[in-house]
Amino acid sequence: MSACLLVVPPLLKCTTGPLLGPAMLAGAAAAAGHDVDVLDLNALHLTGALGHGLPPGRMVGDHDRPVGLLRDVQRAYVAQMAAHLPADPGLLDEAPALTLPYAHAAIAAAADTLTATPWADRLDALLAGERRPDLVGISLLYAGQVLGAAVVTRLVRRRWPGVPVVWGGPHVTALRDEIARDARYGAAADGFVFGYAERTFVALLDAVGAGAPWPQAVVRAGAGVALDAEEDAAVLPRFDRLGVYASARRTLPAQASRGCAYGRCRFCTYPAVEGAYRALGLDGLEPIVRQAHALGGTIAFKDSLVLPARLDALAQQVAGRVPWAACTKLHASLDAARLRSLAAGGCATLEVGLETLTAEGQLLIDKRQPLGLLLGVLDAAESAGVGMVVNYMTGFPGADPGAEADALAQLRAELARRPGLLSVIEHNRFQLERRSPLGREPERWGLRVRGAWPWATVLAWEAAEARAAA
Ligand code: SF4
C-alpha cells in the first residue's frame, strides 16, 4: 500500500465542489487498497477570501458561482503573482500570471521567490497538517495553476525530501509533446502523466509501494515519450472533505462520456486532450446521485458534449432527484417536448457552445449553427424552464470587430426578448491554443505565430491582414 496526497493548486474560479479528475484518481486508488487524500488548496484559497456559505447562484453546475466576487479574488491573485514575474510582454489578451508568456527560468525564479512569501507559509502550514505521503500528485487544468503547482512542489521537496512529485491534468496533457522532448520541464516535477489516468495512477502507487520502476506512462521530461496514460472510467469517484467549499450548495461532478462526439471546432483543444469519443456506462452515476441528494446538492456533467439521446438517458437515471447541468450542442431535436422531459428528469441548466453568429466566424471554426436553430432551442428552454449558458467568442482572426459586436448585440437582444428564460452569456475572446487545429496549422488559416512559451498553451498570433498591412 502507498500513501498519496493529491493537490489542486489555485486559482480556479470554482466554489461549489470538488474536481472530477482527482476524485476519480482517489476512487481508483482507494479501490486498489491505497491511501489517498485530496488537498484542494484552490478551495481553501477561495474560502479564505470569500468565507463559507455563499448562497446558490442562478445556474446549476459550473456556472453556479459568484462571478463578481471571484473576479476580485482572481484580480488579487494575479497581482500577487505578477509582483514576482517579469513585465508583461503584452502579446496575450489575458493576464500573464494566468497565461504564462515566460521562459522556464523566469517561471522558476518567480516560484522561488513566491516560496519565501507569507502566502507560501500558509500553504506549507496546510501541508504540515498532512501525513508524509509516498507520492504527491498535482492536477493542473490551465496555465494559471502552474505557479501555484511550482510553489507546492518546492514546499513538498523541502518538507518531505525524497517524496516524488508527479504533475498531470489537462494542462499537462496539452503540453505533452513539449514535455516529452524538453528535459527542462523536469525541473518542475519528477514525472508527468498525460490524459485520463486512473489505471496508470494505481500502477504508479503499486510501483512506489514496491520500490519498483514506474509505469512507462509516467513520463520523465525530455525522455522522448508521450504515451497516453491508461484510464478506467468505470471507477467510482471519491468525494472527500466537502466542507472546504465556499458555496452553501455542493455540486458533484460526473461524466457520461469522454472525448467530444463532434470534435471539429478548429479553436478547440478538447478532442486533442481527451482523445476519441467514448460513451461511458451509467452504472456509476447512481451513488453520485444519492450523495448529491443527501447533500441537498446538484450534479454537473463534465462531458465535453452530451448528445441529445444521452441527455434523455441522464434524465431517466437521475429522475428528478437532484438538479443537474450538462454541456450539449445546438440541435433541432432539442425541442420543447424534449426539454420538458429533461427538466422533469432534473435538468436545470444546459450549456451550449454557440461561439459566434457571424458567417465568417462559423466558417473559420467549422461550427455552422444558423440563428434559427439557436432561437428554436432558446424558445424550447424558455417553455421548459431550463436555464441556458451560451458560450460566445469575439476576436476571431480576420473578423470585422463591428460585425462581431453587432452579432453579439443580436444575441443579447434575443435573450432579453425571452424574459422567462434564465440565461447567461459566457463571453470570451478568441485565443489560439497550440493543440487546436488552428494552432497546429496556423499558416493554413492565415495566421502567424508571434510568440510561444513553455508553460503557455496559448500562442501569440497575428492575422494575415495584419501582416499584409505591416
Ligand atoms: S467546442 Fe465543444 S463541440 Fe466543438 S470540438 Fe470542442 S468540445 Fe466539441
Image (cartoon, rainbow, N blue to C red):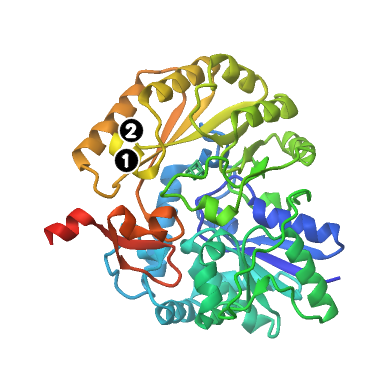
Residue linked to disc 2: 357
Q: 447 above or below 191?
A: above
Q: Callout 2, which amino acid?
A: Leu
Can you tell which quarter of the image residue 45 is in? bottom right
Judge left or right: residue 280 versus residue 226: right
Judge left or right: residue 329 versus residue 364: right
Q: Are marks 1 and 2 in contact (CB under 8 Å)?
A: yes
Q: 320 above or below 30?
A: above
Quadrant location of the C terminus in the rendered image: bottom left
Tell me the SS state at disc 1. helix
Residue 357 on image: x %, y % = 33, 33
Q: Residue at x 53, y 74 (%)?
A: 179
Residue furthest to the left in view is: 469
Residue linked to disc 1: 361
Judge left or right: residue 385 versus residue 245: left
Quadrant location of the N terminus in the rendered image: bottom right
